[in-house]
Image (spheres, rainbow, N blue to C red):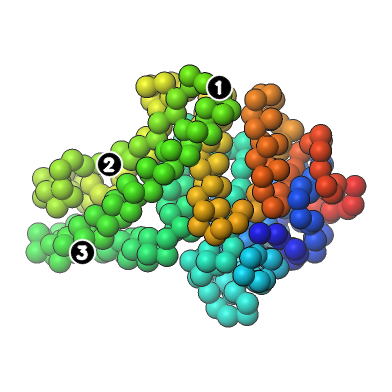
Amino acid sequence: MVLRKLTQINFRNLATSTLEPCAGLTAISGRNAAGKSNLLEASYLGLTGELPGGKIAENLRIGEEQGFVGVQLDHDDGNSTIEVGLAPGRKSLKLDGQSARVVDVSRVSAAVLVTPEDADLVHGSPSGRRAYLDSLLGRLSPRYSVVLRAFARVLEQRNAALRSGFGDAGVEVWSDRFVELGSEIDELRERAIVRIAELAATAYEAIAGSGSRLEVTLQRSWEASLAEALRASRQEERARGVTVVGPHRSDLRIDLGGHRAQAYASRGEARTAALALRVAEFRLLEERHGETPVLLLDDFSAELDPSRREFLLRLVRSADQALVTGTEAPPEYDTLMRIEAGRVSSG
């Protein structure tokens, strides 16, 4: 896949309205706070229809109420145009001029964003790891996206029933559907984790060296069947007014050398483990589409570990297209651009 054209209006501090990166490696250098991350996140939004982080309003230029990001993308089946309209609390999405959902975009387009903040996948909250898993599985499986949306609605209704005080009858109206959807989500996650763990372990060993072992497993918030766990937790549910077991409480467990990384991994180990998870994401999307996703690598020059730097360069070269930012350019590139105060110029 190759991003041929990026167009934006009022996306954060970006001042250049149109960018046409090349196939291969496009290096984008600039000082800190020049807009490098904003440029990659605008590209990610256009390519996936998903916001990389934060509320919609936080992605608009200060003082503006509307924004726009659009991309033109070449892929093996032809080319596609993706348009994203932004306003506080609202996002509109079009694919080739027709209203679309993120799952529709994921059928023709894929991108992977790698940032220094990815270490939070290890040291951060379970919700961040669930978001990583849900985002990846939603791009791999349209069915997963449908089931996850339905589950979120049922969970909301069940929690409302628990808070309402109407008693068990009002809660049970939603329990069967909760178990049905929750069990399917858990099964889809479990199947995907097998492949994610395999790919991530291979990548981690390639970066950290032989003898280093990364294990990734799904840690559920229940044992036995979900239906049994739901019945057993009823007293706690009444006390707290929320559903306390289910896939919305599951976590992605990451172990290094047999020890839990969330508790024991150093910052460097966490960054390596997170990079391995991004590699797994990249490879799974490559398998899904039969071509490499666009690779967006933020702040390459901040990566001081030589083994990670070397691995990143190999990963970049394996992609049909990569956009790489940093305060300095990588040692090799096909095109060099510079960014200052949100404005991009040729290198």
Give the image location of residue 346, x and y in percent: 90, 52
The residue at which mark 3 appears reads as 177
Image: 259 above or below 271: above
Q: Nearer the viewer, residue 234 or 25?
A: 25
Give the image location of residue 47, x and y in percent: 62, 61
Q: Secondary structure at mark 1?
A: loop
Sequence-wise first label, 1 or 2 = 1
Q: Secondary structure at mark 3?
A: helix
Looking at the image, which residue is at 81% across and 34% down? 331
Query: Would residue 130 be visible to someone looking at this image?
Result: no
Looking at the image, which residue is at 14% across and 52% down? 227
Report the disc number at residue 313. Answer: none
The residue at which mark 1 appears reads as 209
Q: CA distance from mark 2 to mark 3?
A: 19 Å
- The amino acid at mark 1 is Gly
- Disc 3: CA contacts within 10 A as few (<14), some (14-19) or many (>=20): some
The residue at which mark 2 appears reads as 220
